[in-house]
């Protein structure tokens, strides 16, 4: 859209609007009510519901305002008898075959058809004929379908295609018999449920929440997702002390993700009220004994005494403190403070899958926000698989390509699904991702890089050429495959490629919801593997908030510790070694902040009271500190913790909870930008490492199955029964009429592979 | 069945009676492929388009848009490929003229497409037929092979620098695929849904490239226009509607068939009563649908003695439209309620389901017709039918909605007596209502 203005007259009032503006948007921005169902921002135009008809002078028929681009001198009428009749008649048509039994429909109360019927419905129903009846059914463990409520706005099929690139649902049959259906009856897709979200009626419904609550019974709390680093904003619907559902519906929440959520964000919440949550503090009085329930006072006192004893006997550094990248900034800050100021140990680490520390130390330009990705002109993705690990980023990439004409350059050892959108797919040998950093740095090592990657050197030339010829934004993304040196080289690329009319933005694909925040707060942090290696040698006690990742478990050395404290929601492989377990409150029960991969600090808000006796992680640490003689002074206020973060951590300076309250305008952390520097050492290091790689690694030719990461059962998703069906390959049940959970027994018999993440 | 010209020399139907008329040598012996030679030897693309404009040829598919104008909308400087697509979907009920042209004179169509492709700079062209015309595809493919072998198609046509190719493609039997944008969707391999206009196909059509979609009869007129010159062709007809037009006559006439008439033929009564041999079995004329099922139905008294001229303007003045030229004649035995129900069921069946008014409206209309037929008619149903049609007309995504509404609107208004007997009588034939229907 240009900055040039054109004059549009709407209902006899003149407006100056940007040239190229869409009439329906202009009308709505100026408070002229235009009803619509099929119009949905940033999806392909449909113009099929015909609700948004307006009269435009010099045009013979009424026009759909969603398809009209404003031109200078356009004279528009949005309110007249003719238009009212047209809108009322469209609604009459839509209601003709729609059941009028809102009280039994899950969408009743937040249904767009219901709302527009209040505005535009007729008092009297002229349709006295028999309605076309169609049976309710399930499309998948997650998606329930009541086809006769469908008004065929096709938002669902468009998000499935345009957002997800899956095209798993499509309209079948013709005319009045048109139904939204799946290919082959059973929905085999990533089960994101975005079709449910965008459905304006009760046609596509959350199969896990079906008939459990009415929308008006729910308290909506805006919060941030606890799964991946995209940091989607969501609305937690709770009734009493129970979290009932999660949606991103724009009537409740307007975050960076719009109405997008992935399967984990939308359906992965039943762990919150799960019966296996740890209910009280637990103490193992003797090694080899059982964990026995204890009171908070007893457990805190016991832990304090033990820690005191170990520190006195073995020194401060015999104690290690380990945080989790899933915790809030507040919890991680208190943990670090606990390590530095209470037990005064140098051994503090965050148990992340990989560290982005080298990247942030060399950061040569701004981080790309998700909005930037959507409007980028070139996107380079090295390694990673955002479709499975950062689904919102994947959606933004897809839309940038499909709707914005961006060029996607994929450098991956696996033909991941995003390849379908890629203008250039550099299919490399597994483990040679670092060579991509060499190629970005210059053409000196092209021969070596191309040989090791198993590609033509010309492909690397095209890569550099595409970046340096781009007008607009270039986003460089990378997954966890890059070495520290390669991360540093990529981080410095803004200095290499930025130019007139071209910004180079960086987007690290961190794995966890607060990987970036954990790094921001982690001054002088150590590697968790080093600490685990030292267990029983120089480290004799550990204090952990959250469990270790599965990859840390095999030789974790936890059994060699004299004393292990773990804050957790559930009993895990880590708590099996613990001497004290504190019940921690989940993200739905606490206030706090997460920092996402855009660098946005976003609020986590308390939706329900902490279940059982659990407490927020930061509060547990604070109470223990108090017992050990140090009062953090935060009382019971997460806001106070954050205020101290803002005072102590330069990147978070001046941020306060009140400034973070509007989820539609998230604030970015002010990461320090490193100056341009000589990369010769790093490049030499990468060159050496690349030269040692084999010349004949076999490339992966198969596109991985949808959900191969998303459906894996982790500690949290393991608590959702539907995930077990998906992890087992989403078997087709005998009947679609009832939930597959009632038809398929989840046991070893249906597991297709070891489904433990 | 009559196939031939009335009131003029046969132009489009000139060769259909010849033995082996579909073969290349017959076509060539009878003036075939002279036009393309003239074009390649002596004319620039602009010359061709100018001739087309002069000819006042209006698109024969139904909308009657001036063909030369349509061609001139294709941007000359577009770097994209350009396409000519022949709409041979001919799915309008009552229309069967294109099939005779393709069946008996396929090379005329090929030559027409070649000239259009030359004028527009198209290298790849398609003939899209309806699914039921499978046998025509076979005929066309043979003709295309013949033309290719004779150097009339493919590389360097007739030794010139002009090269182009024509492919055949069949639909799967959907009426909507006769609508040009739905046809393009179908041709691209997608669901046959209409597309938003603008952009019009001339700017962004097949594969988002400049495309001209023309009816068979439109394209087969092109060789003659080139040969005789646009002006001469126009003079065959009227000032605004040049040339001749094929009428596919069916129904209760003694001599149904495909009639070639000069545009502006005077008049419809004479055409029915004399040229078509009058009404069969000595019955009286009751109604005519002159331009395929989607146009207004005409009462006999709108025709008899009314001097209805048979061209675009004349038929509009007479209360209907030329449409596709599917000329359906009905005698006094026809119950217009029944015939309208039949058509409504067709539109309901063929509604693609994309937009609300057409999808839900046609479904509702059929339900009402069925209820009335089963004795559940109410006097207010006539007004209800009209109101539903009014709510569909002009508000649907593509013209199919209008096409569904017009026959009902005209039938209810022009034949109220046929509706009245269904609406005010119950299933036992007893009157339920005394009073004005409309």
Image (cartoon, grey):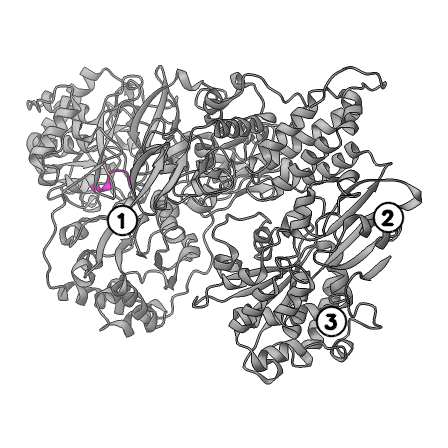
Mark 3 Cα shell of 10 Å, populated few (<14), some (14-19), many (≥20): some
The residue identified by callout 3 is B142
* Front residue of this view, candidates B120 and A508: B120
**Residue B318, horizontal then vertical, whole percent:** 70, 44
Q: Are marks 3 and 2 on the same chain?
A: yes
C-alpha gap between disc 1 and disc 3: 56 Å
**Residue A706 marker:** none
Helix, strand or loop status at disc 1? loop
In this rendering, does residue A107 appear at all? no
Q: Which residues are magenta?
A: A512-516
- Crowd rating for badge 1 (residues with CA inside 10 Å; few <14, some 14–19, many 20+): few
Q: Chain of mark 1?
A: A
Q: Please report the residue visible at 52 percent of the width from the left and 76 percent of the height from the top.
A: B44
Which residue bears the numbered disc 1? A4
Q: Residue B275 at what x, y percent from top left? A: 84, 55
Q: Secondary structure at mark 3?
A: helix
Quadrant of the image containing the C terminus of chain A: top left
Chain of the residue displaying label 2: B
Magenta segment main secondary structure = loop
User: What residue is pinned by disc 2?
Assistant: B253
Whether labels 1 and 2 share one chain: no
Instruction: Give the percent coordinates (x, y) of residue A195.
Output: 47, 36
Q: Are marks 3 and 2 in contact (CB under 8 Å)?
A: no
- Earlier residue among tags 3 and 2: 3
Between A695 and A677, the residue placed more toward the observer is A677
């Amino acid at each position: 859209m240009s900055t040039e203005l054109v004059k549009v007259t709407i209902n006899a009032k003149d407006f100056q609007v940007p040239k190229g503006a869409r009439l329906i948007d202009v009308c709505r921005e100026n408070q002229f009510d235009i009803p619509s169902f099929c119009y949905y921002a940033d999806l392909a135009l449909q113009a099929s519901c015909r609700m948004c008809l307006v009269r435009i002078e010099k045009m013979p028929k009424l026009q759909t305002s969603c398809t009209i681009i404003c031109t200078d001198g356009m004279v528009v009428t949005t309110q007249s008898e003719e238009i009212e009749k047209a809108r009322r008649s469209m609604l009459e048509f839509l209601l003709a075959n729609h059941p009028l039994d809102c009280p039994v429909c899950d969408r009743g109360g937040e249904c767009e058809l219901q709302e527009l019927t209040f505005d535009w419905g007729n008092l009297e129903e002229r349709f006295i004929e028999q309605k076309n009846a169609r049976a309710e059914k399930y499309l998948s463990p997650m998606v329930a379908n009541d086809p006769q409520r469908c008004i065929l706005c096709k938002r669902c099929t468009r998000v499935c295609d345009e957002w997800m690139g899956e095209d798993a649902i499509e309209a079948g049959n013709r005319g009045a018999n048109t139904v939204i259906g799946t290919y082959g009856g059973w929905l085999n897709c990533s089960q994101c449920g975005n079709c449910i979200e965008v459905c304006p009626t009760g046609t596509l419904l959350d199969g896990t929440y079906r008939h459990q609550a009415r929308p008006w019974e729910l308290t909506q709390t805006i919060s941030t997702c606890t799964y991946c680093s995209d940091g989607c904003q969501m609305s937690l619907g709770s009734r009493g002390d129970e979290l009932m559902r999660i949606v991103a519906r724009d009537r409740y929440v307007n975050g960076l993700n719009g109405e997008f959520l992935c399967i984990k964000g939308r359906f992965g919440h039943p762990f919150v009220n799960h019966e296996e949550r740890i209910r009280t503090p637990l103490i193992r009085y003797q090694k080899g004994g059982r964990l026995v329930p204890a009171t908070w006072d007893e457990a805190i006192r016991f832990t304090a005494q033990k820690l005191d004893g170990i520190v006195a006997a073995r020194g401060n550094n015999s104690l290690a403190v380990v945080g989790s990248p899933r915790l809030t900034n507040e919890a991680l800050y208190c943990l670090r403070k606990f390590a530095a100021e209470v037990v005064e140990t140098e051994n503090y680490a965050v148990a992340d899958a990989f560290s982005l520390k080298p990247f942030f130390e060399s950061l040569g330009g701004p981080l790309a926000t998700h909005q930037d990705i959507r409007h980028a002109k070139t996107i380079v993705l090295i390694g990673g698989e955002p479709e499975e690990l950062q689904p919102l980023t994947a959606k933004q990439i897809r839309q940038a390509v499909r709707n914005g004409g961006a060029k996607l350059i994929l450098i991956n050892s696996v033909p991941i699904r995003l390849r379908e959108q890629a203008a250039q797919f550099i299919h490399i040998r597994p483990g040679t991702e670092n060579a991509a950093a060499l190629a970005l740095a210059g053409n000196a090592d092209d021969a070596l890089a191309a040989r090791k990657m198993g590609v033509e050197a010309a492909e690397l030339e095209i890569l550099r050429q595409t970046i340096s010829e781009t007008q607009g934004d270039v986003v460089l993304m990378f997954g966890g495959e890059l070495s520290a040196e390669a991360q540093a080289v990529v981080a410095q690329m803004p200095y290499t490629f930025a130019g007139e009319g071209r910004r180079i933005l960086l987007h690290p694909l961190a794995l966890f919801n607060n990987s970036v925040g954990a790094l921001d707060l982690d001054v002088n942090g150590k590697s968790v593997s080093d600490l685990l290696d030292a267990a029983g040698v120089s480290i004799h006690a550990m204090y952990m908030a959250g469990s270790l990742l599965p990859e840390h478990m095999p030789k974790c050395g936890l059994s060699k510790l004299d004393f292990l404290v773990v804050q957790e929601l559930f009993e895990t492989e880590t708590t099996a070694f613990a001497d004290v377990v504190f019940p921690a409150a989940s993200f739905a029960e606490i206030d706090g902040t997460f920092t996402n991969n855009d660098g946005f600090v976003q609020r986590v808000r308390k939706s329900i009271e902490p279940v059982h006796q659990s407490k927020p992680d930061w509060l547990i640490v604070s109470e223990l500190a108090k017992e050990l003689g140090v009062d953090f002074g935060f009382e019971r206020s997460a806001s106070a913790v954050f205020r101290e973060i803002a005072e102590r951590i330069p990147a978070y300076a001046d941020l306060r909870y009140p400034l973070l309250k509007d989820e539609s305008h998230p604030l970015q952390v002010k990461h320090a930008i490193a100056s341009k520097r000589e990369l010769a050492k790093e490049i030499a290091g990468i060159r050496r490492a690349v030269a040692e790689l084999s010349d004949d690694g076999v490339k992966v030719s198969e596109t991985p199955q949808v959900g191969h990461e998303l459906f894996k059962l982790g500690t949290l998703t393991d608590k959702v029964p539907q995930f077990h069906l998906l992890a087992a390959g989403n078997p087709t049940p005998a009947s679609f009429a009832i939930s597959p959970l009632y038809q398929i027994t989840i046991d070893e018999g249906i597991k297709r592979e070891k489904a433990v993440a | 069945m009559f196939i031939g010209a009335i009131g003029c020399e046969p132009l489009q139907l000139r060769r259909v009676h010849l033995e082996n008329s579909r073969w290349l040598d017959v076509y060539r012996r009878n003036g075939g492929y002279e036009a393309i030679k003239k074009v390649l030897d002596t004319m620039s693309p602009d010359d061709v388009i100018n001739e087309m404009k002069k000819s006042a040829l209006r698109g024969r598919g139904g909308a009657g848009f001036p063909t030369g104008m349509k061609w001139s909308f294709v941007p000359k400087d577009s770097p994209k490929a350009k396409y000519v697509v022949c709409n041979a979907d001919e799915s309008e009920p009552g229309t069967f003229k294109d099939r005779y042209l393709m069946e008996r004179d396929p090379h005329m169509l090929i030559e027409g497409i070649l000239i259009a492709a030359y004028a527009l700079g198209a290298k790849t062209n398609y003939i899209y037929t309806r699914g039921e015309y499978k046998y025509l595809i076979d005929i066309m493919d043979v003709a295309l092979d013949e033309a290719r072998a004779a150097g009339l198609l493919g590389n360097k046509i007739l030794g010139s620098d002009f090269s182009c190719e024509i492919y055949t493609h069949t639909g799967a039997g959907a009426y909507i695929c006769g609508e040009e944008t739905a046809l393009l969707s179908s041709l691209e391999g997608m669901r046959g849904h209409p597309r938003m206009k603008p952009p019009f196909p001339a700017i962004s059509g097949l594969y988002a490239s400049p495309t001209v979609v023309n009816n068979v009869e439109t394209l087969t007129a092109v060789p003659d226009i080139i040969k005789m010159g646009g002006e001469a062709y126009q003079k065959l007809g009227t000032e605004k509607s040049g040339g001749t037009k094929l009428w596919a006559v069916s129904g209760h006439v003694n001599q149904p068939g495909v009639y070639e008439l000069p545009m502006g033929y005077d008049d419809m009564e004479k055409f029915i009563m004399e040229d078509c041999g009058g009404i069969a079995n000595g019955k009286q004329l009751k109604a005519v649908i002159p331009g395929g099922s989607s146009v207004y139905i005409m009462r006999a008294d709108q025709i008899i003695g009314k001097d209805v001229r048979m061209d675009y303007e004349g038929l509009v003045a007479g209360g209907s439209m030329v449409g596709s030229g599917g000329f359906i004649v009905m005698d006094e035995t026809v119950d217009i309620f029944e015939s309208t129900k039949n058509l409504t069921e067709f539109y309901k069946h063929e509604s693609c389901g994309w937009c609300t008014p057409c999808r839900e409206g046609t479904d509702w209309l059929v339900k009402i017709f069925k209820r009335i037929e089963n004795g559940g008619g109410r006097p207010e149903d006539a007004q209800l039918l009209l109101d539903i049609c009014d709510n569909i007309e002009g508000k649907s995504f593509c013209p199919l909605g209008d096409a569904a509404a017009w026959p009902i609107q005209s039938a209810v208004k022009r034949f109220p007596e046929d509706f009245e007997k269904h609406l005010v009588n119950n299933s036992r034939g007893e009157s339920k209502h005394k009073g004005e229907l409309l």
